[in-house]
Amino acid sequence: MSGLTEFGRFSEPALLILVSLADGPKHGYAMQDDIAALTKERPGPGTLYGAIRRLEEQGFIQALPERERRKPYQLTDSGRAALQAELARMRAVASTGLRRLALS
């Protein structure tokens, strides 16, 4: 299974998209709103749709049939697994960092 580290500098937008889709399918504009609520920064369309394309190519998300001229996406099983692995990795790093800060 491949992970988000393959996305290099594009890993943060990809991660945020996966987090956004973790609670159900969304179209691009709804993802932008969700990510903005989470991070206080709204990803631009180029960043968002470039990451969506890469996530789709990796099989982490899939497009659903268009509804009202909007194309929703949903997580795939491999996308859910990649998200879980990345969040566990981030939790371990954060936990270690916080513990080390408390000791200093």
Image (spheres, rainbow, N blue to C red):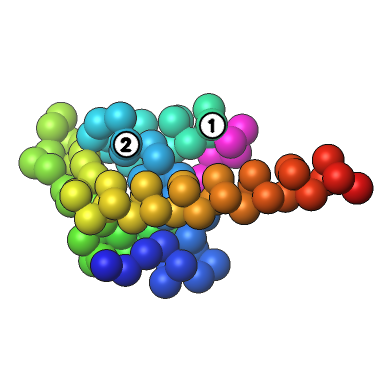
| Label 2 sits on residue | 22
Q: In this view, does 86 lie to the left or right of 74?
A: right
Find out whether residue 41 is within the magenta segment.
yes
Q: Looking at this view, name the residue that lies furthest to the left.
A: 65
Q: Position of residue 101 (x, y in %)?
A: 83, 45
Q: In this view, does 30 lie to the left or right of 33?
A: left
Q: Where is residue 13 in the image (x, y as percent from the top left)?
A: 48, 53
| Label 1 sits on residue | 38
Residue 61, compared with residue 19, is above or below; it is below
Asked which quadrant contains residue 103, the reply is: top right
Question: What numbered label is drawn on residue 57?
Answer: none
| Residue drawn where x is 30% and y is 59% of the image | 55
Q: How crowded is mark 1: few (under 14 residues within 10 Å), some or many (20 or more)?
A: few
Q: Looking at this view, name the residue that lies furthest to the front.
A: 103
Q: In this view, does 72 lie to the left or right of 10?
A: left
Q: Where is residue 4 in the image (x, y as percent from the top left)?
A: 41, 62
Residue 99, compared with residue 51, is above or below; it is above
Residue 53 seen by the camera: no
Q: In this view, does 72 lie to the left or right of 92?
A: left
> Which amino acid type is shown beneath numbered disc 1?
Leu
Picture quarter with the N terminus: bottom left
| Residue drawn where x is 46% and y is 67% of the image | 5
Find out whether residue 95 is within the magenta segment.
no
> Which amino acid type is shown beneath numbered disc 2?
Ala
The answer to whether the residues at label 1 and label 2 have Cβ atoms under 8 Å apart is no
Q: SS at mark 2?
A: loop
What segment carries the magenta color? 39-45
